[in-house]
Image (cartoon, helix red, strand yellow):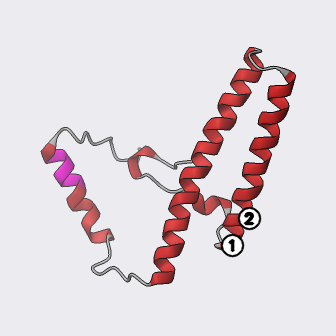
Amino acid sequence: MSTEKPHIDADDPDLFAAELRDLVPALPAKIDAQPEDIEAGLAKLVLTLVELLRQVLEHQAVRRMEGGTLSDDEIERLGVSLMRLQERLDEIKNAFGLAGEELNIDLGPLGRLL
């Protein structure tokens, strides 16, 4: 028997409210907003979004290469650009003490982001 919850449609206010009531006990009663925590949290969010966009760009680049719509020069430039972006992301993650898996945030019923 599956323990996975069914998808709740946000268009159904009663079901959506019930789902929110189920989440309330898991939320902290008070948010401890220390400046260091806020900075790290914001960095994590921004890096997660940039990583998601990098993966989308990489997927599109591979699709275009396989489709034959890029010249050899364009493939080379695109590859170098994506490598430099990955290197820069790694540098920023290291500066904030974040590991790659930490950017794979849980979206609840939607699953993991990355």
**Viewed as shown, does residue 73 lie left or right of 2?**
right
The quarter of the picture where the N terminus appears is top left
Q: Residue at x 58, y 43 (%)?
A: 53
Residue 108, percent from left and from top: 41, 52
What amino acid is labelled 2 in the image? Glu
Q: In this orientation, which residue lies closer to the viewer: 70 or 98? A: 70
Number of numbered labels in the structure image: 2
**Magenta stretch secondary structure, dominant:** helix
**Viewed as shown, does residue 10 lie left or right of 63?**
left
Q: In this orientation, which residue lies closer to the viewer: 6 or 108? A: 108
* Disc 1 element: helix
Tag 1 residue: 95
Q: Residues within 10 Å of mark 2 (few under 14, many from 20)?
A: few
State the image quarter where residue 67 is shown.
Answer: top right
- Position of residue 80 relative to residue 42, above or below, is above
Residue 99, percent from left and from top: 67, 65
**Viewed as shown, does residue 7 lie left or right of 98?**
left
Tag 2 residue: 91
Q: Is 17 included in the stretch rendered in magenta?
A: yes
Q: Is 48 included in the stretch rendered in magenta?
A: no
Q: Residues within 10 Å of mark 1 (few under 14, many from 20)?
A: few
**Cβ atoms under marks 1 and 2 closer than 8 Å:** yes
State the image quarter where residue 94 is shown.
Answer: bottom right
Residue 98, percent from left and from top: 64, 68
* The residue stretch that appears in magenta: 14-19
Q: Residue at x 68, y 65 (%)?
A: 92
* Disc 2 element: helix
